[in-house]
Image: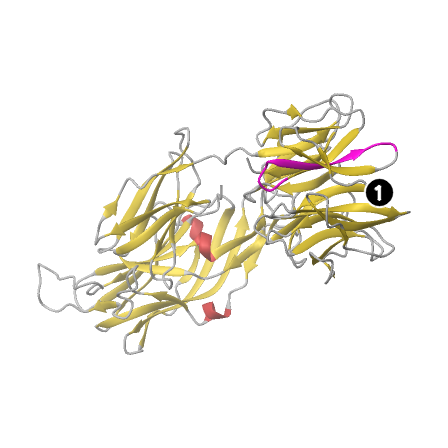
Amino acid sequence: MSKQSRNLIVMVSLATLGCFGEVADPENSDPVQPRLTLLLTDAADTLLASATVDIGEVTALNAEGVSVTLAASGGVHDLLTLQDGVTALLGSVDVPAATYSELRLVIEGATVVLREGYQFTDGTKTQELRVPSGATSGVKVKLGGADGENGSSGVRIANGETVIVVDFDVTQNFKVQGNPATPAGIRGFLFTPVLRAAVRDLAGSISGTVQDSDGQPLADVRVEAAGLDPDVAVAGAVTDGSGAYTIRFLPPGSYTVEVPEQLEASVSVTVDQSQDVTGIDFVIQAAPLSTIVFASWRDGNLEIYKMLSDGSEQTRLTFSSRLDQQPALSPDGTKIAYRWVNDFDGEIYIMDIDGSNRVQLTSDGCWNYLPAWSPDMSKLAFSCGVGANRNDLFVVNVDGTGLRQLTTGAQNNISPSWSPDGTKIVFHSRRGGNDDIYVMNADGSGVTRLTDNGGFLPSWSPSGEQIAFTSNRDGDFDLYVMDIDGANVVALTSNSVPDRGAAWSPDGRRIVFVSERDGNSEVYVMDADGSNPTRLTNTATNEEGVSWGSN
């Protein structure tokens, strides 16, 4: 769960009439000079020891396009000292009576300092954030309702006192680059200004709890409320130790409330003026168990096994006097393609998920290996040793017909993995002199190099947006992930012993792999960002060749 998701609130007190109707002073009908008071407050953060913001000019823009300065300088504030209702004064001025459509806050600068135990990838703990060009001219804060119905009318300032709350959500405004749970660490924070506003006296709230399927409260879970107006920033809150959350300062309107980490759990909620909507509870279901297949020496010979994705129900599937290895689970989880090896060659076989109905697919006397299913399960791509120090990629229909060679040349081309739409195949090749990752069209055309610093055993993510791979670019074999064009390479593991052979879970949230970090080669699973590695097998021998599929 994200633990850096917290909210920063700028409180703007306006002596006025509020949007969505006038707010009258029942004690005094005489006109009162509108006055604006600005207060700043914040909440805790689990990654930062301090977050200092230098706020420059703060202005309000009325419906006629006239700008009114509310504060020439909002001052410098460590946001993390402004918690639990503690506020800091930004400014207090008289303002003309008018309808105001937006606020603008100029951000002169921002500096963050990481807590003890964390550091940036360059070894430092402090970073001055680059302020976007738009922030120097004033971050725009729209004054209107959640549904976009009142955006043009804004807030009418004339008489009485109104408080406007500007939500400066740290999660949306300060994007963590990298992950503190991975060896790649925290590269920095990206400042992306996204603010929203609400009239406090008319605003409502949404609250509830988040629990797991066993009824246990879940802390540090972010819950978000999005209005129908795309120009209004999403509001959010983070659960406390009891699993409770409250999203405050919501303009009246309709919202979709959801837990971003489980988007299928969403609720439509209508918030009326000054209404506190309670009981919007969420139950986070554990990811359903699926099947992982792998090869193991545990019974004295290299055989194919399967298990559930939590490591339970480990079951042997093959019983051969030869070697069975490199299993590839079909996309629907019903079939396994694998390599069978004798003294003379290696052939590709297919069997059912329970080990029955074993069928030989190739019989060409070639050293065939590393099969990969096409997304529609109609074909298998695989590598074939066609000569000394030469391997090429082939594709064949699952009934054994239609064998076609995809690559040619005096180099190794091995380890294919299909894109989710079946139009491309990623593989590793030595055609450039070193082992690197390449991609090509599914017919073998249009070969493009993706890495130039070492790469093996690529695996295309189910979303189609990333490729996981193994590389020894840092001196030993570790797992990495990159975009499908080769950009944004991120290390997922960093060990002095080999981690290799990544395979994605069907939902793309986790990765299974083989590691020697505990002495021998075992199967592990981790989150897709490299966090939470968990050992699934524990034998005195070695495991290899993992693949993950649905049930």
Label 1, residues with CA under 10 Å away: few <14, some 14-19, many ≥20: some
The picture places residue 6, in percent across and down from the top left corner, at 43, 48
Which quarter of the picture shows residue 512? top right
Task: Measuring from the top left, give residue 51's x and y in whole percent.
Answer: 48, 53
Task: Look at the image and give the residue range highlighted in magenta.
Answer: 330-343
Which residue is drawn at the image coordinates 66% and 28% (left, top)?
355
Identify the residue at horizontal 33%, vertical 39% (top origin).
281
Judge from the rendering whether residue 199 lies leftward or rightward of residue 465; answer left or right. left
Asked if residue 477 can be seen in this view, the reply is no
Q: Quadrant of residue 500?
A: top right
- What residue do we see at 58% from left, 25% from top? 312
Q: Residue at x 45, y 55 (%)?
A: 172
Q: Nearer the viewer, residue 446 or 262?
A: 446
Amino acid type assigned to the residue bearing label 1 in the image: Cys
On the image, numbered disc 1 is attached to which residue?
366
Q: Which of the image's four quarters has the C terminus?
A: top right
Q: Secondary structure at mark 1?
A: loop
Q: Is residue 60 left or right of residue 463?
A: left
Can residue 255 be seen in the rendering of this structure?
yes
Q: Residue 336: horizontal and vertical position, in percent?
A: 66, 36
Answer with left or right where residue 477 lies relative to residue 138: right
